[in-house]
Amino acid sequence: MQRWQGLEDVPDDWGSSVVTIGVFDGVHRGHQRIVGRARQAASELGLPVVVVTFDPNPDEVVRPGSHPPYLSTVRRRADVLAGLGVDAVCVIEFTYELSRLGPDEFVRTALVDRLHAARVVVGEDFVFGHKASGDVALLAELGEKYDFTVEGLPLVTEDGVRISSTEIRARLAEGDVVGAAHDLGRPHRVEGVVVRGHQRGLALGFPTANLETLPHTAIPADGIYAGWLFALDPTDGSQTDSWPAAISVGTNPTFDGRERSVEAYALDRYDLDLYGAHVALDFVQRLRPTLKFDTVDELVAQMHEDVAETRRLLA
């Protein structure tokens, strides 16, 4: 799969393509349906399929300070899209100037001039252009002008609830990582760099990797979780090793902590030296909320139970 950082990276000899466009944060099951239909259309037309996405999130540019928590990094987004079989991902830097483009100019810039869109596949709620003044109907009109067709797909719903990035963020805020994984089609992932913490886990017999998470990351609610710890290659983000892990999110109230942290204990591994490493945590299931214990011995006893439950769940 080709990855382009901006439209200027699109090869000069790039021909016609089927394009889908959006933020695609999390690349959840609703997004996957759109990408799947784009792939089907591309196969029918004998063309490559291109996903156009944006960084930073347009909301942060249009309404500074309103940045929604990210469900995935841009690199993770591209990796998941590659797994869905797209031919290219184009990451466009979303700027104030881009947000000021009218619908016609936006379409010509993002879809026509470099990508030569023959068909555009989007969700039925897709909006574009200055102040989100364009919708699917207008996109279809512009398609007639610029010689591409448009498909607006119904959104994916279950039990009357629409699968969306907003809905998944709400699930994570409640600690419902199982529900989030159902909507994502895979466990929610948090990435970061391992830094030195207070090293209490080591003293208690459970050495943990303390993550300095990336800005604006969607972190699940405070609690103890079963999950997986992955070491990532710093150059391309590929997984180089993995361990089942008990994950703690919270302020360590037993020690009167105030700063929220994300820590992971790789089960039965006391020899890992991950300081400075880029790692990822996949959250599988919440075991319990964060609790304050009266004594350290009570905490340690509960940690043994958490590890045993993690081992059972991930076996």
Image: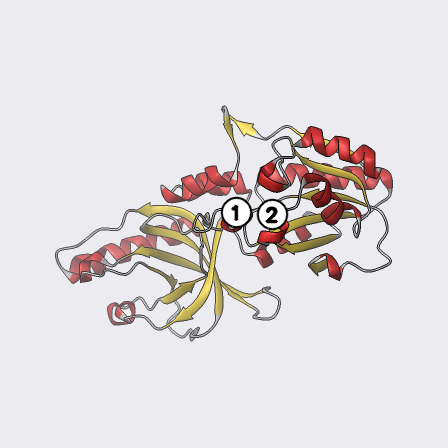
Q: Earlier in the sequence, mark 2 or mark 1?
A: 1
Work out how far the residue at label 2 is from the one at label 1, CA to CA, in angstroms: 7 Å
Direction from residue 254 to residue 188 in the image, left or right: right
Question: Vertically, is 154 above or below 273?
Answer: above
Q: Residues within 10 Å of mark 2 (few under 14, many from 20)?
A: some
Q: Is residue 85 visible?
A: no
Q: Residues within 10 Å of mark 1 (few under 14, many from 20)?
A: some
Question: What secondary structure is marked by label 1?
Answer: helix
Q: Answer yes or no: do the residues labelled 2 and 1 have beta carbons within 8 Å?
A: yes
Front residue of 132 and 118: 132
In percent of width and height, residue 314 lies at 44, 51
In percent of width and height, residue 87 lies at 76, 52
Question: Vertically, is 70 above or below 211?
Answer: above
Q: Amino acid at mark 1?
A: Val
In percent of width and height, residue 143 lies at 79, 35
Q: Which corner quadrant of the image does residue 179 belong to?
A: top left
- Identify the image quadrant of the N terminus: bottom right
Residue occupying image coordinates x 58% and y 56%: 74
Question: What secondary structure is marked by label 2?
Answer: helix
Question: Vertically, is 243 above or below 189?
Answer: below
Q: Amino acid at mark 2?
A: Ser
Residue under label 1, please give it.
Answer: 62
Residue under label 2, please give it.
Answer: 99
